[in-house]
Every structure is written in structure tokens, then in C-alpha cells.
Image: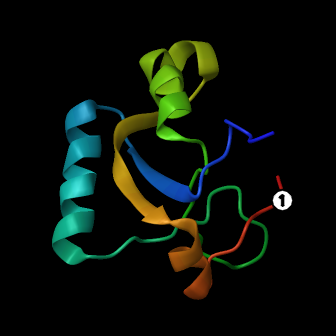
Amino acid sequence: MIRDDISSKLVHLTRDVSDRAAADALVSIVAERKLRGGTTCIKGNYRCVCFSEAPLSKLTHILASPGATGMRYKPFGVMVDKNWLFVRGGRPVIY
């Protein structure tokens, strides 16, 4: 059985207090061609860039009702192939 809750793609969504600020963050990512890692909720002295492996079909439901899910992210982001990211050092995390 194929799982419909994971994807071969990974999505990095932007977040901010407003849609405009989150969209501006995406414009900055594209212009600079760079994702900057954060340290929030990260143990040790590491900077990490977070991605979701949730398929777009699932993300649309989550993003449509952020209050119900507690999700802070906005519907702006970049998608990459999971294998592409793994070749460049990306790895799964344990929550």
C-alpha cells in the first residue's frame, strides 16, 4: 500500500505574522538563492532549515485552517526533491 501522507518532495514554508511578510521572505529566498537556518527548538549549537514531507494535497488542508492545526506557516515556500536534498546533507529529524 502506498502511503498518502509522505512525499518524495520536501517543502520549506515561510512564516511570519502576516501573509505579506511571509511572501516577502519567499521573495528574499528566491532573490538570494539561500535558505537561512534557525535555532528555535534545536538542541546544541546548530542552525537548521526545516522541511515537511507532507504532500501538497495534505498541506492545502492544513494551511486552509491554521487555527485548527496550530500551524504558524503561510502558503509560501519552496519545494525540492528529497534525494536532491539528501545528497546535499539534508537529513530527517527526530521530534
Task: Look at the numbered disc 1 and give the secondary structure of its residue.
Answer: loop
Image spot of residue 43 (x, y percent): 78, 68
Q: According to the image, what is the colour scheme of the structure? A: rainbow
The amino acid at mark 1 is Ile
| Residue at image location 53% in from the left, 24% down from the top | 62
Among all residues in the image, which is located at the extreme front? 1
| Residue at image location 35% in from the left, 33% down from the top | 17
| Residue at image location 39% in from the left, 71% down from the top | 35
Vertical placement of residue 22 versus 71, above or below:
below
Q: Could you tell me how many numbered marks the image carries?
A: 1
Nearest to the observer: residue 20 or residue 61:
61
Q: Which residue is mark 1?
A: 94
Vertical placement of residue 5 versus 94, above or below:
above
Q: Is residue 35 left or right of residue 10?
A: left
Image quadrant occupied by the N terminus: top right
| Residue at image location 48% in from the left, 53% down from the top | 11
Quarter of the rendering containing residue 82: bottom right
